[in-house]
Image (cartoon, rainbow, N blue to C red):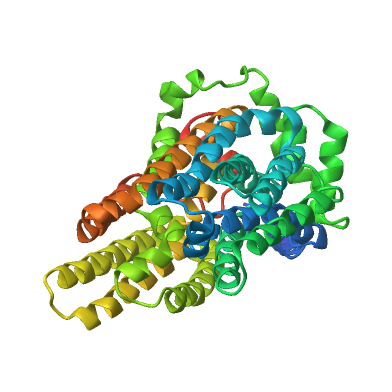
């Protein structure tokens, strides 16, 4: 048996051991709590530090190109009657003028990725604006149809480049928690460009409207002198010092960029083991999903009829027996708030829900317009049918502005890794403009063939879009570009 002193000594040691274990547990809990608090504070600090003056200014300068895009799309609708009368253009000649924009855009889009990879995103925007400025000037000075077409073609060429490089540039400069909303500002400015052109075209002549189209071109070219290059492009070409400076400017001088910088650097270095992707390289198994998503969305977006409606809205309202000016002003009233709502919801609700709602709405809008023409053809509810057409166009315009207008470009800028982004972006953008040309050139002929049938075809395509989105489109909200591309299976980080 143990003596009393030995027992007391043993009990004392046990008690001391228990106290020490308790103190260790408390210290561990305190350490964990402090670590969690520090992490939360860091996340909050990072989150609050992401929107900087430089980021806002850089995005504004970039989307001036989007405004040019919208102005070019909207130009042909309000000037149709005056331009046709002044230069004595036939339906075929005006259809060529309206659609040659998309031919230029196809060529610009085909070259856009390579140009952007070779000289950088910022220089590419400046390059495109030179062509847009020359194009608007040619339209302003035109006295014959030939120079109208040359000017429209030049604007289209610049537009095709801008349609790729602007959303890609914005996606590459913004942090993941803001990328969707900021990239969709591209669509907001396209909408504003279209809307401003519709409104101004109701009050000024076609020459003055062309002159006004040069203003955002000049604004962007001046702004490009003061904004930073894309950090991800700088990392891709190995300009590491400039990469750090550009990223720090965009995130703010007081923001810790070490984590984001390391992730981009590691990803860029891993890509160096791969050769620069060409168009042929895109058709490998590893890119299949990305191509189906990117190309499929663009095809469905265009064959849903958007550019037929945007290019020739005034003639649609006239055909439906409604005032073209009132109808176009109503489109403006709907477009701007719905596009803004899409931007606000982009990083909250996610890409897929907005696309599903948007595609469903465009389907309903086309069905309403088709129904109105069917009623007119059957001589039923003639006066009411014009209001049904107006309602259909407004439902279509509002729904398209909510998601289908901007989100395909956002997803296109997210899903392709940077080593093939140039080639892939060019392919996707060319597909978009080929579809746009087909619709814009044939739209007037389709309307002469069967107005109701034209919109029922568009409605069918919009219905297919709903199924396509539900089955194939991934959700990219709240993920870095590197995480998205890794999840698709390209590079394991």
Q: Place residue 447 in its image quadrant.
A: bottom left
| Residue 398 picture location, percent across and down | 43, 69
Residue drawn at 70 percent across, 31 percent down: 266
Q: Place residue 47 in its image quadrant.
A: bottom right
| Residue 489 picture location, percent across and down | 48, 31
| Residue 271 picture location, percent across and down | 64, 24
| Residue 175 picture location, percent across and down | 68, 53
- Number of numbered discs present? 0
Relative horizontal placement of residue 189, taking residue 256 as reference (left or right): left
- Is any atom of residue 253 visible in this view? yes
Residue drawn at 72 percent across, 48 percent down: 133
Relative horizontal placement of residue 291, taking residue 209 as reference (left or right): left
Q: Is residue 110 above or below residue 296?
A: above
* Foreground residue among 289 and 445: 445
Q: Place residue 399 in its image quadrant.
A: bottom left
Residue drawn at 51 percent across, 56 percent down: 406
């Amino acid at each position: 048996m143990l003596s009393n002193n030995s027992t007391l000594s043993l009990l004392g040691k046990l008690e001391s051991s228990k106290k020490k274990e308790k103190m260790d547990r408390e210290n561990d809990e305190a350490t964990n709590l402090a670590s969690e608090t520090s992490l939360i504070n860091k996340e909050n600090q990072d989150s609050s530090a992401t929107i900087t003056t430089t980021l806002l200014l850089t995005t504004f300068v970039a989307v001036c190109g989007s405004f040019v895009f919208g102005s070019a799309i909207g130009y042909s609708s309000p000037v149709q009657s005056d331009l046709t009368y002044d230069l004595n253009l036939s339906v075929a000649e005006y259809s060529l003028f309206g659609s040659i924009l998309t031919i230029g855009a196809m060529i610009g889009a085909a070259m856009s990725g390579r140009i952007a990879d070779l000289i950088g995103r910022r220089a590419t925007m400046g390059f495109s604006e030179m062509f847009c400025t020359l194009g608007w000037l040619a339209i302003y000075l035109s006295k014959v149809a030939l120079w109208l077409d040359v000017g429209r073609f030049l604007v289209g060429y610049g537009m095709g480049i801008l349609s790729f490089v602007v959303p890609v540039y914005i996606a590459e400069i913004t942090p993941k928690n803001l990328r969707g909303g900021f990239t969709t500002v591209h669509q907001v400015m396209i909408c504003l460009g279209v809307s401003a052109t519709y409104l101004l075209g109701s009050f000024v002549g076609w020459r003055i409207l062309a002159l006004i189209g040069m203003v955002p071109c000049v604004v962007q070219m001046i702004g490009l002198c003061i904004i930073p290059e894309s950090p991800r492009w700088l990392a891709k070409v190995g300009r590491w010092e400039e990469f750090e400076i550009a990223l720090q400017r965009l995130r703010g001088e007081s923001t810790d960029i070490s984590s984001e910088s390391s992730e981009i650097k590691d990803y860029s270095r891993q890509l160096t083991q791969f050769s620069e992707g060409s168009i042929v390289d895109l058709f490998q198994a590893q890119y299949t999903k990305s191509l189906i998503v990117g190309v499929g969305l663009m095809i469905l977006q265009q064959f849903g009829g958007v550019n037929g409606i945007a290019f020739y809205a005034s003639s649609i309202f006239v055909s439906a027996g409604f005032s073209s000016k009132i109808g176009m002003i109503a489109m403006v009233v709907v477009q701007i708030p719905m596009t803004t709502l899409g931007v606000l919801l982009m990083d909250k609700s996610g890409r897929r829900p907005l696309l599903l709602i948007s595609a469903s709405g465009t389907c309903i809008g086309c069905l309403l317009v088709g129904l109105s023409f069917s009623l007119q053809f059957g001589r039923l509810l003639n006066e009411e049918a014009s209001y049904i057409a107006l309602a259909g166009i407004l439902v279509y315009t509002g729904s398209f502005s909510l998601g289908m207008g901007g989100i395909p470009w956002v997803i296109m800028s997210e899903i392709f890794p940077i080593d093939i982004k140039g080639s892939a972006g060019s392919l996707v953008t060319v597909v978009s403009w080929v579809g746009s040309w087909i619709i814009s050139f044939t739209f007037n002929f389709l309307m002469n063939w069967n107005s109701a049938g034209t919109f029922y075809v568009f409605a069918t395509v919009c219905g297919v879009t709903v199924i396509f989105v539900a089955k194939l489109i991934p959700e990219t909200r709240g993920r870095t570009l590197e995480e998205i591309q890794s999840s698709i299976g390209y590079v394991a980080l």
